[in-house]
Image (cartoon, rainbow, N blue to C red):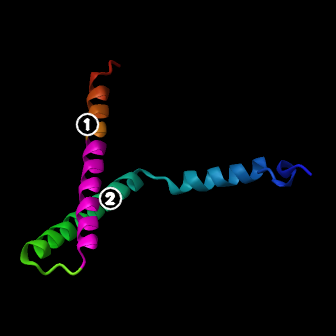
Amino acid sequence: MNSLSSIAGTSTAELLKQKSGLESSSQGGDFANHLKSALNEVNEYQVSSENAIGDLATGQVKDLHQAALAINKAEISMKLMLEIRNKALNAYKELGRTQL
């Protein structure tokens, strides 16, 4: 028996229903909300990293591994946010150079 025959295909009606659900949920403010929540998350990582560094400096750290994870998570999230910012600025500059 062919294992591929047991996989059911998605009908066109189901795809259209999913597409209409996506279109109705996507609005202009959603991007701003996602960006704001991502910035808040990066800020939370930075705060937890600063707390971990403070605990390391004062010798109050309970788990060195968790402190290192918090610091690395904050560093990686900041690098990602900076790359997103750079890409957005480059796209904005490119739009400014576009001739209409």
From this view, report whether residue 19 is shown above or below residue 63: above
Report the magenta residues as a range.
63-85
Relative placement, left or right, of 58 versus 93 is left
Q: Quadrant of the C terminus?
A: top left
Relative placement, left or right, of 3 versus 66 is right
Residue that appears at 7% across and 77% down: 58
Quick one: 40 or 6, which is closer to the camera? Answer: 6
Of the image marks 2 and 1, the number of the one nearer the N terminus: 2
Based on the picture, tell me whether residue 69 belongs to the magenta stretch: yes
Answer yes or no: is residue 42 visible.
no
Based on the picture, tell me whether residue 86 belongs to the magenta stretch: no
The local crowd at label 2, few if under 14, some if 14 to 19, many if 20 or more residues have their Cα within 10 Å, is some
| Callout 1 amino acid | Leu
Query: Which dot marks residue 77?
Result: none
Residue beneath label 2, please?
A: 38
Residue beneath label 1, please?
A: 89
**Most extreme residue toward the right, as rendered?**
1
Q: Quadrant of residue 69?
A: bottom left
